[in-house]
Image (spheres, rainbow, N blue to C red):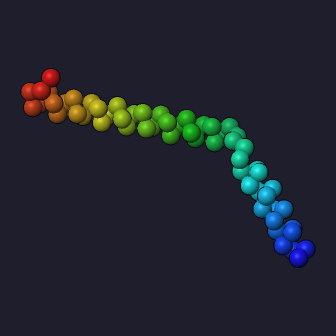
Amino acid sequence: MRILSITIVLAALALAGCQREGPAEKAGRSIDNAADKAGRSIEKAGENVRDAAQGKK
């Protein structure tokens, strides 16, 4: 029973520590957002080129 209690307490502490976001996580999220935005911009540019080649717009 004691081992189970210790395991539960350690798991709760580990999960509590994972909820905080440090500077590395924030930077990683910013990089991910920038990459997503760049990808959408490139896709939109490709669509514009395709439309121009087909005589649309």
Location of residue 6 by image quarter: bottom right
Q: Which residue does the image show at 77% across and 51% down from the upper left?
A: 16
Given residues 6 and 32, the one toward you in this image is 6
Q: Is residue 15 above or below residue 41?
A: below
Quadrant in which the N terminus is drawn: bottom right
Considering every residue shown, the one lying at the far bottom of the view is 1
Considering every residue shown, the one lying at the far right of the view is 2
Query: Residue 50 location in percent, x, y?
Result: 17, 34
Q: Which residue does the image show at 78% across and 62% down from the upper left?
A: 11
Given residues 16 and 26, the one toward you in this image is 16
Query: Residue 47 location in percent, x, y?
Result: 22, 33
Relative side of 10 to 2, left or right: left
Q: Which residue does the image show at 84% across and 73% down from the upper left?
A: 4
Given residues 45 and 16, the one toward you in this image is 16
Query: Residue 28 location in percent, x, y?
Result: 58, 41
Query: Residue 26 location in percent, x, y?
Result: 63, 37
Relative side of 45 to 20, left or right: left
